[in-house]
Amino acid sequence: MFEELINPISDDQPSGEYLKDNRTLYRGYRNAFNMAQSSFRQLVETPDALEDAEAVNANTDNWANLAEECQKCLKETSKDVEIFSWFTVSQLFSNDPFKRLAGALTAFEQVVESNWETLQPTLPEKKRKGEGEDAQAKEVAEFRVKPLLQLVGDTAESGLLYMPLQMLPLVGETDYGVFFKAEKSGGLSDLKEAAIKALSDERSDVEERILALGEAMEALIKLEKTLSEKCFNVGAQSISFRFVKDSIERLLNAIKYLVGDQFTRWPLDPEPEEEPVQENNTIETADETPMSEADLSTGAAQPVAQNGVPVGISVAAFSSAGAVASREQALSQLQSIADYFLETEPHSPIYLLLKRAIRWGGMSLPELLAELVGDNGSVHQRIEQLAGLESAEHESNIKPTAMSTVGAVSHATAAVPSAVATASKPAEPSIPTMPVEEKKEENSTSTDSDSNDGLSAIEW
């Protein structure tokens, strides 16, 4: 079902047409979405509406119709971000909501990754206001991601996914709305007891829900990361998935509180790795008295274990083992930090700036200046003069003055304590850095004659 959404619509137009130029076609999709949204709002806002079978069935039919219309559009007409957003939320009204939500989000990310250059909506050239290719590329990117805000939300209780997620059963008849009320009223212990009883009849179903929610979270993180990278490449402002990820996290935490202790291993925890059997290589020594400072300075012999480390040396003697010992190690640690921020904050430019610093660290100073200054020859020449780069190839005719080796050695020895003289070494060259201009927060671009371009006004 979801795989067919990834395939290009045609060779000439992989992402299809710009729907806002075909108002009749777009209006049909908009009407289907409005009907589904209206019937759901009626269930939410009308007392006892959930007991009305006719209203419940009408809502189910409306969302099923929207899902069918959007799926057909994404396959045959346009891979449009807004249509994909409507299709994604419609999966929460299916017979397997969490699993199908995860599948839709995964397909969404794959379409964004493979079709970004043609992904709809692409702002027509006649409506672009930016001057130059760079400005227009930024404008197009921000116009393209703007419709996603209606899906993921820009506040804690907004977005198309928010309310349906609160109403889906987690364990037994307990949804997050029931859990939240019990938490506020102090009735969680009774709710937990009821959930444990319900788990005995639906353990496999609950486990599948947990796994599906985990897949949905992974897909959201990956989609957010992909969009962040695409926008950053053109200097555009992406959008944060923080609030929708918080919603998924709350559902998982609620299930874990209710029945988490009923699982031998929480379904989302990694499989435990089998630890290799280690041979007992412990060496018993008659005397393991720590070495004194005098012993360390004189190099007194100590018992040595099989790994080559003196047995008697205290832990304090190795306190500096974690210190950065080389330039390569420092850059490697920077890469680890960048990987951390890539995983935890893909919407933030922190990891990209760190990776830029690492890349700059591998350049020579002339290469770095060429990238920073670009084609501005006068500035480039002035920096070279101030830095002395024009003298790099200069060879002096001045003969070096003879110097007493003994005097030089004795002077150096006097300046360095004897205990560390042999361990001293030249400092590693630092990585050249330049200040990064902070990018000002910008509102999403592109307002044109069509007031519905991009974000739809949605209030539950």
Image: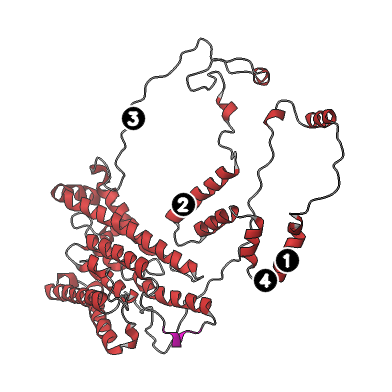
Q: Do the residues labelled 1 and 3 touch (CB within 8 Å)?
A: no
Q: In the rendered structure, does residue 378 fall within the stretch colored magenta?
A: no
Give neighbour class at mark 4: few <14, some 14-19, many 20+ (Cα, 10 Å). Answer: few
Where disc 2 sits, the SS reads helix
Find the magenta span and give its range: 124-129
**Label 4 SS:** loop
Asked whether disc 2 touches disc 3, contact meaning CB atoms under 8 Å apart, the reply is: no
Q: Which mark sits nearer the N-terminus, 1 or 3?
A: 3
Residue 128 colored in magenta in the image: yes
Residue that label 2 marks: 339
Q: Label 4 sits on what residue type? A: Asn
- The secondary structure type at the circle numbered 3 is loop
Counting from the top left corner in percent of width and height, residue 19 is at 32, 83
Horizontally, is 358 left or right of 89 in the view?
right
Instruction: Mark 1 vs mark 3: give the one in front.
Output: 1
Task: Say whether marks 2 and 1 touch (CB < 8 Å).
Answer: no
> Can you identify the residue that label 1 sits on?
381
| Quadrant in which residue 108 is drawn | bottom left
Q: Residue at x 71, y 68 (%)?
A: 379
Q: Quadrant of residue 448?
A: bottom left
Tell me the distance, in whole angstroms, between the alpha carbons under discs 4 and 2.
34 Å
Residue at numbered disc 3: 276
